Amino acid sequence: MEFLIEYGLFLAKAVTIVVAIGVVVGLLVSAGGREKKGAQGHIEVTYLNDEYDAMRDTLKESLLSEEELKAEHKAEKKTAKAKQSAEKKALKDKLPKEPKKRVFVLDFDGDMKASATANLREEISALLTMAKAEDEVVVKLESGGGMVHSYGLASSQLARISSKGIPLTVCVDKVAASGGYMMACVADKIVAAPFAIIGSIGVVAQLPNFNRLLKKNDIDIELLTAGEHKRTLTMFGENTEKGREKFMEDLEDTHKLFKEFVSEHRGVVDIDAVASGDVWYGSRAVDVKLIDGLMTSDEYVNSQMDDAEVYGLSFEHKKSLPERLGFAAQHALDQVLLRWWQRSQNGRWFT
């Protein structure tokens, strides 16, 4: 009986908390709707040099002896002092300060609709306000392709960088195929991991047709169009040979545009040899000049650390007030249930 009473008290408290949070969320949802329609997100900048330095220092402290650490610190101080003296001398002699190269690192993880293009657009718009010809933009690209118009827009966003005379490098760790390669070929330089999948310069379209199934069940489909080619192949109507010919004509024209795009941006490629829809692993893609070298994105970014200031850029969406409250409510409920579970494991219920 005591067990049931304690359990009932716990349940009442849990329900009360959930209901209270729900009421607060409900009251503030309207307030969230009245929030100012400002920016839907913001750019976050990470100074990657500091991150890698911190990791290196952590390893040093774990692996080196006290004597070795002292020697390291002494050498670092000496280097810093020499650099400071050189800067003071240059300032005294009124020598122009040589600008240090900056590298801006972006991530693009593509789906069928190239949904990440919205973020890419904001990131590129931001970096173009600061980037100069002596800087570099690195895009870590992963995509197996998708809709033609979506990846066409994503490629155009990357072309904004090249059109400003800013060097663009694309790094591929896993896959840049079809629409993904359409994006990659815009770059001045493409590097890929040895087993990354590259290429697939082709176009594919498929759709099921249920016309015979519908006829078998005495179901008629009426498709009304104005314009001879408004609809060529359909899922439910009876497809004609004329419709198929027109569909294939459009498909071939899209493939032609794709090949022209790759040839325009990557003239070193023998387009007729690679535009068969085949794919190559990175180590083979070098041979057909689809990429320029074998290297992972981490290796490439790390190689820039000594001579450049490396910044990671990402566009983070602004969460609405209801979304923030929803996350807070979920966290509170999770904590209540966690405490209940922990206490129950110790032989008594949370009260």
Image (cartoon, rainbow, N blue to C red):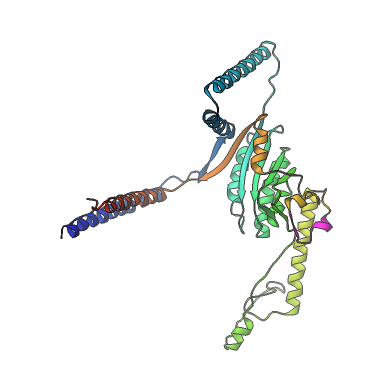
Query: In the picture provided, is 201 more to the left or to the right than 80?
Result: right
Quadrant of the image occupied by residue 131: top right
Number of marks in picture? 0
Examine the structure image and report whether residue 332 is included in the region drawn in magenta: no
Q: Position of residue 194 (x, y in %)?
A: 71, 49
The x, y position of residue 4, in whole percent, is: 19, 60
Residue drawn at x 62%, y 78% is 236
Q: Is residue 287 left or right of residue 109?
A: right
Q: Nearer the viewer, residue 111 or 285?
A: 285
Name the quadrant of the N terminus: bottom left
For residue 3, which quarter of the picture? bottom left
Please indicate whether residue 58 sits to the left or right of residue 342 in the image.
right
Quick check: 263 above or below 63?
below
Image coordinates for residue 22, horizontal then vertical, percent:
31, 54
Q: Is residue 276 magenta?
A: yes
What residue range appears in magenta? Answer: 271-280
| 102 in relation to 5, above or below | above
In-front residue for pair 312/341: 341
Q: Residue at x 69, y 49 (%)?
A: 156
Residue that protrudes farthest toward the top in the picture:
92
Residue 162 is situated, as x and y percent measured from the top left of the image, at: 72, 42
Question: Is 108 positioned to the left or the right of 289 in the image?
Answer: left
Height in image: 153 above or below 80? below
Between 343 and 42, the one nearer to me in the picture: 343
**Residue positioned most to the left:** 1
